[in-house]
Image (tube, rainbow, N blue to C red):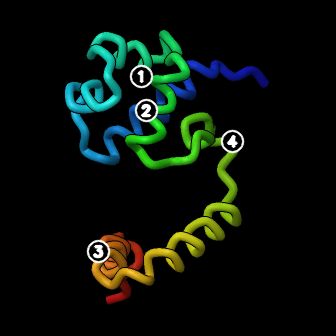
Amino acid sequence: MSYDIKEIFGKNLRREREKRNLSQEKFAELIDIGIPALSKLECGKSYPKTQTLQKIIDVFKISPHVLYVTDDDFDVNTAYDDMLSRLKTIKQNKEIFKLVYERFMEIPYLYKD
């Protein structure tokens, strides 16, 4: 199986940006690149310099691997363990935990009428 690392990176970059409701303009400003350069990254036509990659990771506050994961790599058990670990961390802050809980409960299939 062959992977196009630029395409995978671009797809994940866009997903992470949109997850945070950041426009291309705002995100490009945060990582100190032009909008055309960001567009090329998200389309998988180019790859970031090391400094830009570090800024992306810092702005998103994520592990680098998040930008390289494919759908084939998703493991439910690993994701579950990661979620539990993060919940233990945020449990210490009641306000943040409440926000996460409220978002979690918004997922329709969790409700039983």
Give me the residue at 25% from left, 26% from top. Answer: 29
Give me the residue at 61% from left, 65% from top. Answer: 82
Disc on res. 72: 4
Q: Amino acid at mark 2?
A: Lys
Q: Amino acid at mark 3?
A: Leu
Between the residue at mark 1 and the residue at mark 4, the CA separation in whole angstroms equals 20 Å
Relative depth, front residue between 35 and 3 = 35
Give me the residue at 58% from left, 40% from top. Answer: 64
Secondary structure of residue under mark 4: helix
Q: Which residue is mark 1?
A: 42
**In the picture shown, does residue 58 fall above or below 88?**
above
Between the residue at mark 1 and the residue at mark 3, the CA separation in whole angstroms equals 29 Å
* Residue 108 visible in the displayed image: no
Foreground tag (3 vs 4)? 3
Relative depth, front residue between 113 and 75 = 75
Mark closer to the chain start, 1 or 4: 1
